[in-house]
Amino acid sequence: MSLPSKQVPRLAGWGGYPAAPAKLVRPERLKDFSLQEGVQIARGQGRSYGDAAICSEGTTILTERMNRFLDFDEETGVLRAEAGATLAEILTHFVPKGWFVPVTPGTKFCSLGGCLAADVHGKNHHHDGSFSYHVTQAVLVDGLDRPRVISPETEPEAFWATAGGMGLTGLIQEVSLKLQKIETSYVSVTHRAARNLEEAVALMEDPSKDDHCSVAWIDCLARGNSLGRSVVMTGHSAARNELPPDIQDPLATWHQGKLRVPFNFPGFALNPLSVRLFNQVYGAMQGNKNQFITHFDKFYYPLDGITGWNKIYGKRGFIQYQIVVPPSEGTKGMKEIISRLAGAGHGSFLAVLKKFGPQGQGMLSFPTEGWTLALDLPFNPKLLGFLNELDQIVADCGGRQYLAKDSRFAARHLPGMYPRLEEFRAACLVLDPLGKFRSDLSRRLGILP
Ligand SMILES: Cc1cc2nc3c(=O)[nH]c(=O)nc-3n(C[C@H](O)[C@H](O)[C@H](O)COP(=O)(O)OP(=O)(O)OC[C@H]3O[C@@H](n4cnc5c(N)ncnc54)[C@H](O)[C@@H]3O)c2cc1C
């Protein structure tokens, strides 16, 4: 059935770059949905940074209305929900009942479908793996308009092609996610200062300092012996007896203040000097608070409290550069990348380092064992050439780019960075023999013919 559509002049991901005209449809209910004429791609909350959730040559299917909870099993913790449901909606409903999502990215404003399609990771990857590990099954409408129940047991090829497959195997209709029990909605956090990258990595590798979740925030403009100066933040879900007595409701959901960025900031607000100032202030502030209890919203989603924070990068937008390098590389590749960034004056508001555990089974899933570094860089045309140079360093150390963050890397790196690409293509040929699911990302990188 063809749905009413709307043409928009500009559709972009969270980074605002690139933007393209797009035709949108927004089915209200699962039963309204059937494959559209031509090519198409699903879009959840558009929190991927680049062009993964845009199909400028066909139709972009907004899934936000298909967000109902369908079933919850109190015994197993498995929630079955329509794929447009967001983590924010799940947390609002289930945290007061003592349940939390098992893996979460740094924003809760993303859909279940988007989390499975990008096989997202959180601060606990080294313990709990990526999102797909906790999905017991999903319903996928494939390229022949057939709803298929897929799971690691019943349809492993279809499932592991879909987990991390960036929407290219079909439209995910439903996701069954195993939630985790929590005693409180608070996190016990420890901050440790690291004088350079080696110290940060050593702290994160030290089992006596590991605490389920860990992440380092890096001042990526520090140079010389201080290269990689950071604050290492670890944390675990707090037990009731860890809460201070003044906390009345241990399972409170908490609504962060509605701080808003109302318009696109001028580009000059982001020159390297203001970035340097920001880094110093933030570094000092974080480093002084060593051990404390905080609400999960502050720990997992610090940026969600500022509505539309992506607009501070101005109309031209920004690029998030996220890579992973294998542990055999140690800190060499990361140091080279950070020092090139520091030298080139491409300041970054956010530089986040996380440790990944063993690789999962998703054919195109991003996480592989090693260190992942994510940086936000204001867009300017010179940046593109510079990032191409960094890509070569990443490729040379056997690393890879994250497709959900990408908006610009060169197609020639794809087969080396994603060695299971041919297996993925073969699975897509079965699921979508007519090639109905394509995105601007898949076209740009030649993921599928
Ligand atoms: C502030 C911020 C922090 C982030 N932190 C992290 C992080 O820590 N870890 C991490 O892994 N990611 C992180 N991300 C990226 C984000 O989690 C992923 O891009 C996620 O896919 C976004 O979900 P979405 O619903 O917005 O998906 P969209 O951006 O709308 O789509 C992303 C991909 O999923 C596909 N897709 C969406 N819905 C469906 C569906 N129903 N069926 C089939 N395919 C579908 C789209 O086609 C597209 O390829 C972060 C993003 C932001 C903005």
Image (cartoon, rainbow, N blue to C red):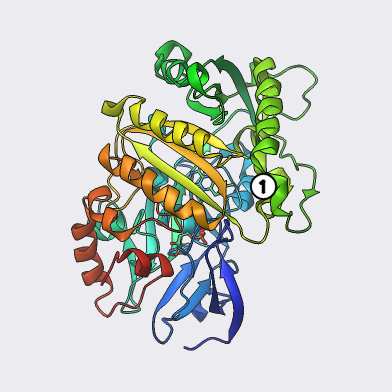
Q: Secondary structure at mark 1?
A: helix
Location of residue 197 in the rendering, given as x and y in whole percent from the top left corner: 46, 21
- 214 in relation to 113, above or below: above
- 224 in relation to 76, above or below: above
Location of residue 386 in the rendering, given as x and y in whole percent from the top left corner: 44, 48
- Depth order, front residue of 42/34: 42
Residue at the top extreme? 208
- Depth order, front residue of 445/145: 445
Image position of 137 (left or right of 223):
left
- Depth order, front residue of 126/238: 126
For image coordinates 59% across by 18% down, the residue present is: 190
Location of residue 44 in the rendering, given as x and y in whole percent from the top left corner: 53, 63
Query: What residue is disc 1 on?
Result: 92
For image coordinates 69% across by 15% down, the residue present is: 288
Image position of 124 (left or right of 297):
left
- 73 in relation to 127, above or below: below
Three-letter amino acid code of the residue under disc 1: Thr
User: In this view of the protein, can residue 308 be seen by the observer?
Assistant: no
Location of residue 216 in the rendering, given as x and y in whole percent from the top left corner: 52, 27
User: In this view of the protein, can residue 309 be seen by the observer?
Assistant: yes
Total marks in image: 1
Image position of 357 (left or right of 419):
right
